[in-house]
Amino acid sequence: MSLLTPMIRPSVVARLNPVAKLAVALTVSCALLLSIDWVSAGVALLLEALLLLWCGLSARQFWLRTAPVWIAAPMAAITTILYGEDSGALLWHLGFISVTDGSAQLGLAIGLRVLAIGLPGIVLLATTDPTDLADGLAQVLRLPARFVLGGLAGLRLVGMFIEDWHSLTLARRARGVGDGGGLRGAARRFFGPAFSLLVISVRRGSKLATAMEARGFGSDTPRTWARPSRVRGADAVLVGIGFGIAGIAIGVAVWAETWSFILA
Amino acid sequence: MHATLTSTRPVTANKPRNFRWRVVDIVVASVIGVASGVIFWAWGLAWSPLSAILTFTPGLEGLLAGGWLFAGVLGGLIIRKPGAALYTEVIAAVVSMLIGTQWGFSTLIWGIVEGLGAEIVLALFLYSNWRLGVALLAGAGAGVAVGLLDTTVSYAALDFGFKAVYFTSAVVSGTVLAGLLSWLAVRGLARTGALSRFAAGREGARARSGALS
Amino acid sequence: MPDPSSFIPARGPQIRPVQIQARSWGWRHAGRQNQAVSGLDLEIEPGERVLLLGASGAGKSTLVHALAGVLGDAEDGDETGSLLIDGRRAAEARGRVGLVLQDPDSQVVLARVGDDVAFGCENLAVPRSEIWPRVRRALAQVGLALPLDHPTSSLSGGQKQRLALAGVLAMQPGLLLLDEPTANLDPRGVLEVRDAVVRSLDRSGATLVVIEHRVEVWQDVVDRVIVLDPAGGVLADGATDEILASHGERLAQAGVWVPALPPRFPARHPIGSGQTLLRAEGLAVGRVPFGRRAASVVAAGITLSVAAGTATVVTGPNGAGKSTLALTLAGLLKPAGGSLRACENFAAGAAPEPHRWRSTQLLTRIGTVFQDPELQFLAATVRDDLLIGPRALRLSVAEQTNRVDELMRRLRLDHLADANPFTLSGGEKRRMSVATVLATRPRLLILDEPTFGQDSRTWQELVTLLAELLDEGTALVAVTHDAAFVSALADEEYRLGTPDPIRLESGAR
Ligand SMILES: Nc1ncnc2c1ncn2[C@@H]1O[C@H](COP(=O)(O)OP(=O)(O)OP(=O)(O)O)[C@@H](O)[C@H]1O
Ligand SMILES: Nc1ncnc2c1ncn2[C@@H]1O[C@H](COP(=O)(O)OP(=O)(O)OP(=O)(O)O)[C@@H](O)[C@H]1O
Ligand SMILES: [Mg+2]
Ligand SMILES: [Mg+2]
């Protein structure tokens, strides 16, 4: 187990086709990117929150995974409140910075938007095994197998970074360059193995490519797939829900007359 | 991405240029993409506090953009095949998204646009010039792409002055963080011999010493 | 474009075996001055079983890579002459050929055991219904009793080797190429795997080319021996017994392990009972999994002591925890339980627990060679890498050069002084990693599989060197599967037990 090959608990969401999950998160993201308003973002977030109850992540995993979003959302909101296009009543003013009714509302919208776009993506992917995703990409979306599997192999090599880091520090310690040297030594001990890590994975990549070719990989002849990736009814339902969320969010915003198309 | 073009123009000695991706190209591009993705992710975490500091300047946050632009230039410089910059940048974006960023799926869209920025510059040089100048331009290209995208989408709500400052600082950041640093990294990698299966690595090794040729 | 139908092996037991033909074939790796192989003339008939021999660095691996069509194109090196598989260029016949590479660590493709074995079959477009039975059969054949969804990242060296072999056997290729397929296996595993290969060949009738330094393992099951000459071409070629009988002497000279002419064991002149350096009592060893605080124990209840001038060998089946024990004794991993203490004289001012020593304190006390030599390479050339230890000890420049030159000469690495350590052949890498620790003259040497993949000449030199060090009072702990090494040097043998057997998952995927 490692950062990129998570332990995935069996759950409804874990069994869904990764491509369907991808489609849902992409649909919702695109819909929300089209407008900046607090109504569409808020409605989408609310609907998602109901769905996330079934995601099958433990509470600890959920908060750990989604932590970046919870930090970023207020940050994004603050930036916008301070620098957002001003309109309406002036609330506060200092040099470049001005806070107005309009910019405060924009800030709220941006904050909600970051949450609504970030959460489903993270949660859906935290419940997806990379191998299954690759199977889906190649079999359902028919992306070229050479690239999908080459990519997966690269992903696995980097997924071993943590273990490799451990082995490398052990090896450096055994070679007498594992400690000492004060601050400079400490920096060297971080950047040394970090660079070694890159070097070793590039090397492993080169060799792994040879090993893959040695097992018949890389020609353009069609290949079969030992693990079928099928789109089932449940996946269609999920995609439907995704379009539903996007549609409702936009619909409500238009109805509430807060919808503001970014390119308009 | 599945380029099978072959050009007869010689690069080094009289070896024919082959634009088809070998398996080793794909795997190594992916490795670089994935490793960069982890850095993207970490940069995303560091970005929040850093940008909070820059929040009190109008638009200098653009200086941080380069942290997400280097993957494409790096991949392009090492693999030297059409699509390499785009591929590496997109892989990096997807991986940071897999680990979890605050930008969710829009990370993918950004990755595509940023990758294209670098890719177009390398294509303008017909994938045959890999000197420092081209690397800097490719980084700048990625900066232009992300500058345009951010100012129309992320900061759509901000005023023009902010957008202008942001755009300029994104280009500067791309040139330095993505262009210069990637070029240096390729040199470092070549020196370790890790790129021995790539033209980029063999040129570096030849430059280093005549002992092994 | 090759005929696509040729990628799909015939159904049923009969596979069309491959024919090989080399005409003054040669290869020079890009960036190298010397040819790796040159002037090779060969013909191997369909269904023949060939043992490929030759000194370390003779070009055996290069040849089988070429046969598998994975040597690359003009970007990767210069080819001369022709090498044909069934009358076509090797690169075009890819898929008819299955290759197990020399380095087991770098051939794991996918994250789960079952998927990894299935990978080759998928590439050959074997129908799905046929893949999983093949996968299960191949895993059983090589004796890898793990669930199909077992993660491949936590396998021991020997387990990885079995996995790679299973992946190739499942492909049922027309030509099976094995590059030292049993170097990391325990003695029982060696026979098990060899018999698995033979059974699979009996069924398929495929051609076999196997590289192995230890002739006795394969001599009864192959029809023919080909010995590569490091200077180019073939040194000897013919029926196994004939060649071994008529050319035995010459081959042994060239580093081939001829069973009738085993390398001489060095004479030992022990200095009497040495001082105890390290003592383990009820020691438990294990690794701490990522994100966890407690180690998962792989072996426990280990009581042994290591004395100056004596050689302790650790043996046991694959996955028993030998490497983990070695790393713990070396002060690199923290004991998971029990105690491990250095005697006062050995600690010489440092803490009694080796894992608390500083890195430079370790240098003169314990030198460790890892099972995977590549992990330890730090510099861009062999010479620079060897100099790292002596530099960390702040020796005088003259002394540094002296030691390193002497080591390179003795381990026959001097012609590679400016080569990049990562481009060395398997045996050269192993010698190089042993040289790195010898350069700092530690009082205790811990070597994980020091002799795997060595030809008999290098083996003899290595063992002689170790015997000398032992006589001078250095203590040695070696993890090994090599029975000859045990008889040559071991004063004490510590056998680690069998790991808990894990059942092969019966449920189909
Ligand atoms: N990728 C490479 N780049 C440059 N040189 C190489 C490369 N691979 C092998 N060589 C060199 O080519 C020569 C032959 O190596 P090869 O690996 O074929 O030897 P080998 O007979 O298999 O030896 P061993 O028994 O030690 O594995 C060696 O001198 C080695 O250093
Ligand atoms: N990096 C690792 N992370 C987690 N588990 C590991 C790791 N390396 C090995 N193991 C597991 O620990 C156990 C002992 O491994 P170890 O490498 O010590 O075995 P070994 O006796 O040296 O085997 P071999 O003869 O095959 O080298 C094995 O079951 C293996 O699966
Ligand atoms: Mg070899
Ligand atoms: Mg081991």
Image (tube, coloured by chain):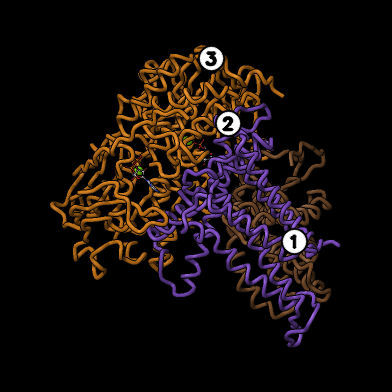
Chain colours: A purple, B brown, C orange
Residue at left offset 21%, top offset 56%: C338
> Which amino acid does the dot numbered 1 rest on?
Gly
Q: What element carries label 1?
A: helix
Report the chain holding disc 2. Answer: A
Residue A168, located in which quarter of the rendered image? bottom left
Q: Mark 1 points at which residue?
A: B139
State whether discs 1 and 3 lie on one chain: no
Task: List the residue tagged with mark 3.
Answer: C15
A71 versus C36 height, above or below: below
Dot in front, 2 or 3? 2
How many angstroms separate mark 1 from mark 3 (CA)?
Answer: 53 Å
Q: How far apart are marks 1 and 2 (CA)?
A: 41 Å
Horizontal placement of A136 versus C285: left or right? right
Residue at the disc numbered 2: A228
Residue drawn at (24%, 52%), measured in percent from left and top? C284
Instruction: Give above or below for C276 relative to C33.
Output: below
Question: Of discs 1 and 2, which sits in the foreground?
Answer: 2
